[in-house]
Amino acid sequence: MDLIMVHLSNLLDDKLANLVTKQDFLSLHNEIASLKNENLSLKKEICALKNENAKTEKLLDEIDNKSRRNNLIFKGLSDNNQDNFGKIISEFCNEVLKVNLNVDHLQAFPLGRMNVSNRFNRILING
């Protein structure tokens, strides 16, 4: 009888050795709590980064709008002298608009591609 009891005890011990213990549950619980805290802090960081990104985009839009305020686009001008678009605009303003334009402070460059007659349709002045 003792031999049977010892044998059953050994079988029971072998079967119970693979079962999850309370310590295993506590360990998993602590890991889950740690992951929840990390997840919460990451969510807060993402929210802060989204707000910062929105502010940066708004500032970029404001700067872009301010930089475009002084832009003028001229269309249909003859650009035989393609090397100096500022000179073309200056001559047009002096002759047609009767406005003296200081080309030294302006940047002039063509917009888009050349058309069929190898001319640019639009010239941008940025000042």
Image: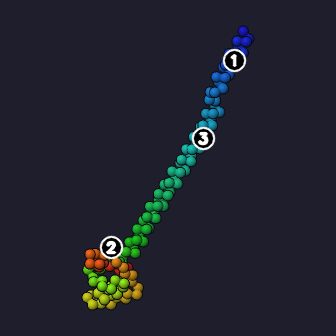
Q: Distance between the residues labelled 1 and 2?
A: 89 Å
Kind of element beneath mark 2: strand
Kind of element beneath mark 1: helix
Identify which residue is drawn at 55% across, 44% down.
Answer: 36
Asked whether, in this view, residue 70 is left or right of residue 76, the answer is right
Quarter residue 33 falls in: top right
Q: Is residue 105 above or below residue 68?
A: below
Residue 121: image x %, image y %?
28, 77
Q: Earlier in the sequence, mark 1 or mark 2?
A: 1
Quadrant for the C terminus, please: bottom left
Q: Residues within 10 Å of mark 2 (few under 14, many from 20)?
A: few
The tag on residue 9 is 1
In the rendered image, is residue 74 in sight? yes
Residue kind at label 1, given as amino acid type? Ser
Kind of element beneath mark 3: helix
In the rendered image, is residue 99 in sight? no
Q: Name the residue under label 2.
A: 112
Q: Do the residues labelled 1 and 2 touch (CB within 8 Å)?
A: no
Quarter residue 71 falls in: bottom left
Q: Distance between the residues labelled 2 and 3?
A: 59 Å
Q: Name the residue under label 3.
A: 31
